[in-house]
Image (spheres, rainbow, N blue to C red):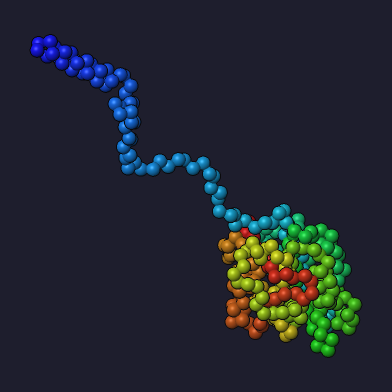
Amino acid sequence: MKKSIFVLILCISQMMNISAQIVSSGKVSVLINNKQKPEVKQNKPPVIEPNNTIVQPAASMELPIAGGKYYALIIGISHYDDPLINELDKPIKDAELFYNTITTRYTFEKENVKLLRNATMSEMVDALDFYAKRVTSVDNFLIFYAGHGVWEASSEIGFWLPSDARKSSKLAWFRNSTLRDYLREIKSKHTLLVSDACFGGSIFKSRSAFTDATLAINMLYELPSRKAMTSGTLTEVPDQSAFLKYMIDRLQNNFEKYLSSEQLFGKFRMAVINNSNVLPQFGVIQDVGDEGGDFIFILR
């Protein structure tokens, strides 16, 4: 009996030793049933990695001028050699004021601007020939004329009168058709004609609003243009020009970086109508390559 009890105690002791060896095997990642303890998932906030993408700035509002220059031919004629043609008091003064305005406030360099006082026919032609050779397809060209103009209803031809014009002969009368030929020859990106002369409206192809008001300035600059603004239609205009008075005033008091010629015209049109007997005109010059753009004045 004692021997049986001893054998039973010995068996139990050996079994307990084996279990202890398994538990204390030192393999901490392995349990008795050989299954790895599942990991407990925690609700941690997502880790946001730094974004190394470079954010580009918004598109620049600068115009794609690409080196384009601003040229201008400014003509003021107050004196006429022929006593049968009336003298004018204001054109040279207005031309000088316009010259000073665009060369001091806008991007017209003085070496690119010609101011002709009491210009003869040959001087006007020589100046236009000069710009026809100088102006390129990325440049901008402005022509300003203040002086007498004539409209022949029978032939429907308009003229500017240079200082050496004679009433009895058209030899030195500058035809609007000749001007259009030069505007076609001068391969500028944009051309703007400003004419403070009698019958200046004869230069137009159309005199209605023509540009899409939703077009951005850079789109107006991108499309070629040939535009004109004049102080009257086919009626005489006074020597004291409300047209030039208000146009120059708006240029002098403008603080917008970019100002299209149509915007400029809109700023002074009603002031001219309300303070004179003329109806200023603005539109496309006929048959010289306008594609819907506009001349843009740029502040310095």
Q: How many marks?
A: 0
Q: Is residue 268 above or below residue 189?
A: below
Q: Is residue 108 above or below residue 9?
A: below
Q: Relative to residue 165, is residue 35 drawn left or right?
A: left
Q: At 62% from the left edge and 77% from the top edge, which residue is drawn? A: 269
Tell me residue 40's x, y (percent).
Answer: 31, 37
Tell me residue 265's x, y (percent).
Answer: 63, 73
Q: Is residue 239 visible?
A: no
Q: Residue furthest top?
A: 3
Q: Is residue 176 visible?
A: yes
Tell me residue 209's x, y (percent).
Answer: 65, 77
Placement of the N terminus among the 4 image quadrants:
top left
Q: At 64% from the left edge and 61% from the top edge, which residue is drawn? A: 218
Which image quadrant for residue 38?
Answer: top left
Q: At 33% from the left edge and 35% from the top edge, which residue is drawn? A: 39
Which image quadrant for residue 180?
Answer: bottom right
Which image quadrant for residue 244?
Answer: bottom right
Residue nearer the viewer, 84 or 160: 160
